[in-house]
């Protein structure tokens, strides 16, 4: 099977699903994007960290741009929060 020139022969079904998801959803959480989600929800870094089950210093590091969020659970939670933040603004 080929997706946009990417051969997925030999890949597991789970990896193929992740490829499809990453092609359809932007999983790059820049410092601006992370901060915007948090601020739209009206959360402090501590509250945001508690929701994501990470430490406040981790959120601070993301927002400073020294690192980016990683790990499927965190990325999935950020996507969910981003949808909630967009809905709250509308």
Image (tube, rainbow, N blue to C red):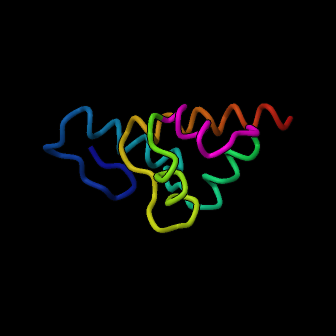
Q: Quadrant of the N terminus?
A: top left
| Residue plotted at (43% across, 47% down) | 22
**Main structural element of the magenta stretch: helix, strand or loop?**
helix
Residue 87 sits in quarter: top right
| Residue plotted at (53% across, 67% down) | 65
**Nearer the observer, 18 or 61:** 61
Question: Magenta stretch: residue 50 in it?
Answer: yes
- Position in image of residue 58 (x %, y %): 46, 52
| Residue plotted at (46% across, 49% down) | 23
31 over 18 or under it: above or below: below
69 over 15 or under it: above or below: below
85 over 25 or under it: above or below: above
71 relative to 77 in the view: left or right: left
| Residue plotted at (52% across, 47% down) | 56
- Position in image of residue 29 (x %, y %): 53, 54
**Nearer the observer, 10 or 41:** 41
- Position in image of residue 21 (x %, y %): 44, 40
**Count of numbered circles on the image:** 0
Tell me the magenta residue range: 41-52
**Nearer the observer, 51 or 3:** 51
């Amino acid at each position: 099977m080929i997706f946009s020139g990417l051969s997925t022969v030999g890949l597991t079904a789970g990896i193929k699903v992740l490829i499809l998801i990453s092609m359809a959803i932007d999983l790059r959480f820049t410092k601006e994007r992370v901060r915007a989600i948090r601020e739209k929800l009206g959360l402090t870094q501590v509250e945001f960290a508690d929701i994501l089950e990470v430490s406040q210093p981790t959120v601070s590091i993301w927002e400073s741009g020294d690192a980016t969020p990683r790990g499927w659970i965190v990325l999935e939670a950020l996507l969910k929060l981003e949808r909630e933040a967009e809905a709250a603004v509308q």
